[in-house]
Image (cartoon, rainbow, N blue to C red):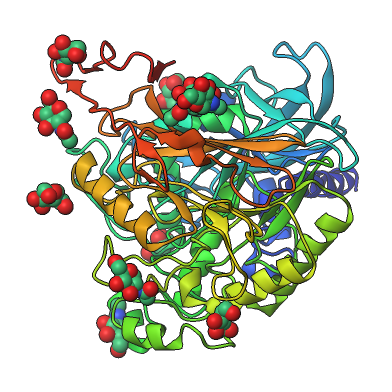
Amino acid sequence: MKFLIAAVSLVSMVTASLDGNLNYNSPSRRHPSLGIDVPKVVRRGLETRAWDPVQLNFTHGVASGDPYPNSVILWTRVSPMLENDKSNVTVEGNVPLYNHDTETYIEASPNPVCVDYQIGIDRDFSSIVDKGTAYTTSDIDYTVKVEAKNLQPFTTYYYQFMVCNSDNKSPLGRTKTSPSAEYDGSKIGLAVYSCSNYPNGYFNAYGNAARKDNIDYVVHLGDYIYESTRGTLGKDPRATNPPREIFTLYDYRTRIAQYRTDLDLLLSHGQYPWIPVWDDHEISNNGWRGGSSGLNNTEDSFLKFGGVSVDQRKMNAVRAYFEWMPIRQVDMDDNLRIWRSFQMGKLLDLIMLDTRNYDRSITTLGWNNEYIADLKDDASRTLMGSHQENWFYNQLSKSAARGATWRLVGNQIIFSRINNTARSSDWLNADQWDGYTANRNRTLQHLYTNSISNTIFLAGDSHANWVSDLVWLDEKPYDQVTGVGSVGVEFAGTAVSSSGFGGTIANATTKSKGLVRDNKELQWSEGYYRGYYELHISPDEIQANYFGCPTVASRNPFEISLANFTVKAGDNHLTRNVGNGTVEAGALQRGTTRQTNVTLNTETGTWNVTMFNQMFIQY
Ligand SMILES: *[C@@H]1O[C@H](CO)[C@@H](O)[C@H](O)[C@H]1NC(C)=O
Ligand SMILES: *[C@@H]1O[C@H](CO)[C@@H](O)[C@H](O)[C@H]1NC(C)=O
Ligand SMILES: *[C@@H]1O[C@H](CO)[C@@H](O)[C@H](O)[C@H]1NC(C)=O
Ligand SMILES: *[C@@H]1O[C@H](CO)[C@@H](O)[C@H](O)[C@H]1NC(C)=O
Ligand SMILES: *[C@@H]1O[C@H](CO)[C@@H](O)[C@H](O)[C@H]1NC(C)=O
Ligand SMILES: *[C@@H]1O[C@H](CO)[C@@H](O)[C@H](O)[C@H]1NC(C)=O
Ligand SMILES: *[C@@H]1O[C@H](CO)[C@@H](O)[C@H](O)[C@H]1NC(C)=O
Ligand SMILES: *[C@@H]1O[C@H](CO)[C@@H](O)[C@H](O)[C@H]1NC(C)=O
Ligand SMILES: *[C@@H]1O[C@H](CO)[C@@H](O)[C@H](O)[C@H]1NC(C)=O
Ligand SMILES: *[C@@H]1O[C@H](CO)[C@@H](O)[C@H](O)[C@H]1NC(C)=O
């Protein structure tokens, strides 16, 4: 009898702690068949022995994200092995797990791993603000995601995880809450990223912002991983793991885990709270609601690609993403929902969209491009689906009504109309908003009709830099020289490491010159450098600073200041002279390009900083 009581209380205790790990709720708590059977995990755990703390490692650092004024998400992975889980643990007893590092089988138990966490105002934890215990198991790839609570707004915190009853500790993480909605007069800095392709190059851009350390939060607009395969494992230092295009849950976990070994990515995750959304490659290239370029929703495709359907593949990718990313699931009834928003003081609202996977009408898939070109103006076409689209317009209105100065829209693809003739045989890229013109018109209509001011679109996806006034061409007058008639600004950024325009810097500049010639709202185009941009936001103005990495072929800390832009509150266009009249690379409307010839000394592996000293920033 006594034993029974003890067992029962242990069950409820462990259940509560499993609940503390938010990853048991993903992808959907309300649809148990899609998620984890927590009672089963608890029963299994009670039958098996506990882990010895020395068997466990924090394999992929720490991360934090989705800052609210009083809470933030903390993440780590604590595991008996580097290898990712195949979710193949049998319920009956112990399962031998193979440790690829030691080439031995571990007498593994599916017993939960126990971790404590704490968060405080300094590195020494002289004052602990929140702490707790959480459990993880192979079911969620040994990931841990908890919400640290009771925090003060717009405050820096340090956090750490520890294997229970041991001194086995994770690296120390740093994070920051958001300002409360009422907070007035703060300044906020963001680093904005997209398109980090591991085999294509080193993630220097992540590390550069972290080394300068003059921002508060990281925003990632998607293509955090790529699903394709490249290189030979064991031969090429950045060959993809697994060595194939990814489809299964194990595949997606393994791919994200590999990306999370890049030292600059780890640095950024450990130092800033991230606010990410996915684009197509977190699942599959040129995704839409019913498929992607490489996978039709047909019997043929199903058989060709190892029996993983479009829906199952999406589910696998989404589950691995939620397990590994330090983000909140804002709607437990909607497991595909990543679109969400953040109020950051009176200063700004950050509205993060999913124009890709949630409910998007068909896009260009290679074989159907002519059909999409014919279809692009169809009134029913949507990038977001009606649920999200209505939410989006409401968010814009509510944000204006509450008196937030700025509205930042974290979106994947380029919003502005772009004539691509200068770099492509096809003027139209219908995989961007250009393929969904009715949806774009509805958005512009909402902004103009409701006189919603100070809206800044952010975009990634394109692997190049595009800075534009936000205009409704053929509907509202627009003066290219003064910017009058524009309703906001678009800042689209280049890739962390995915390929740009290609060729030499001179080739890329030629293309950019053509692009600004053919697109009057496009004020700056640049497609040579890999990099990112920072936004420094204050009540009076936004400063956008674009940075380029001279090379991603090696891990290095060099960067070049490419261009700076200002937007004054209330102007709704880029401040003239745009870019202060001079940029380092690419092409500027009515401006000049310095275009320094950057050289690498291949003998020493250093950049020629003699010549370009004023331009290079080495941290
Ligand atoms: C954990 O880390 C220690 C120390 O780095 C190492 O010796 C051990 O092999 C690792 N264990 C596993 C299971 O990876
Ligand atoms: C799961 O384990 C069983 C038994 O060991 C094995 O037959 C099966 O192939 C495994 N499935 C996967 C997806 O690894
Ligand atoms: C998808 O279907 C189209 C049209 O039938 C075909 O051209 C294309 O090759 C298919 N793609 C795949 C990956 O099977
Ligand atoms: C795109 O620009 C080219 C000039 O490079 C022009 O000839 C063409 O008419 C433009 N296309 C559209 C659709 O505006
Ligand atoms: C979008 O607005 C433009 C400008 O008014 C108009 O020419 C175009 O026909 C509209 N497209 C759709 C699909 O409504
Ligand atoms: C770069 O420009 C040169 C000179 O105009 C041209 O010959 C070459 O084909 C271009 N290369 C690429 C990759 O566009
Ligand atoms: C951008 O501004 C910084 C100072 O904030 C300056 O050092 C840098 O040279 C500027 N970059 C360009 C391309 O003008
Ligand atoms: C703009 O350019 C002028 C001269 O070209 C320079 O003095 C000034 O510092 C620049 N301002 C910024 C913000 O880069
Ligand atoms: C840059 O300088 C190097 C070395 O002087 C030269 O080989 C190369 O052609 C130059 N590149 C461009 C684009 O001017
Ligand atoms: C670096 O620039 C200086 C000054 O122009 C030049 O003398 C030197 O040859 C350059 N070094 C390399 C490695 O390009």
User: Looking at the image, which residue is at 53% across and 30% down?
Assistant: 268
Left/right placement of residue 442 relative to residue 317 reads right
Q: Confirm whether residue 230 shows in the render.
A: yes
Left/right placement of residue 393 relative to residue 510 reads right
Write down the quadrant of residue 479 in the picture: bottom right
Left/right placement of residue 576 relative to residue 82 reads right
228 relative to 137, above or below:
below
457 relative to 554, above or below:
below
Q: Nearer the viewer, residue 606 or 263?
A: 606
Q: Position of residue 537 (x, y in %)?
A: 68, 36
Write down the quadrant of residue 474 in the picture: bottom right
597 relative to 399, above or below:
above
Total count of labels: 0
Write down the quadrant of residue 584 in the picture: top left
Q: Position of residue 205 (x, y in %)?
A: 43, 33
Q: Nearer the viewer, residue 104 or 208?
A: 208
Quadrant that contains the C terminus: top left
User: Looking at the image, which residue is at 37% across and 81% down?
Assistant: 296
User: Looking at the image, which residue is at 84% across and 31% down?
Assistant: 151
Left/right placement of residue 496 relative to residue 509 reads right
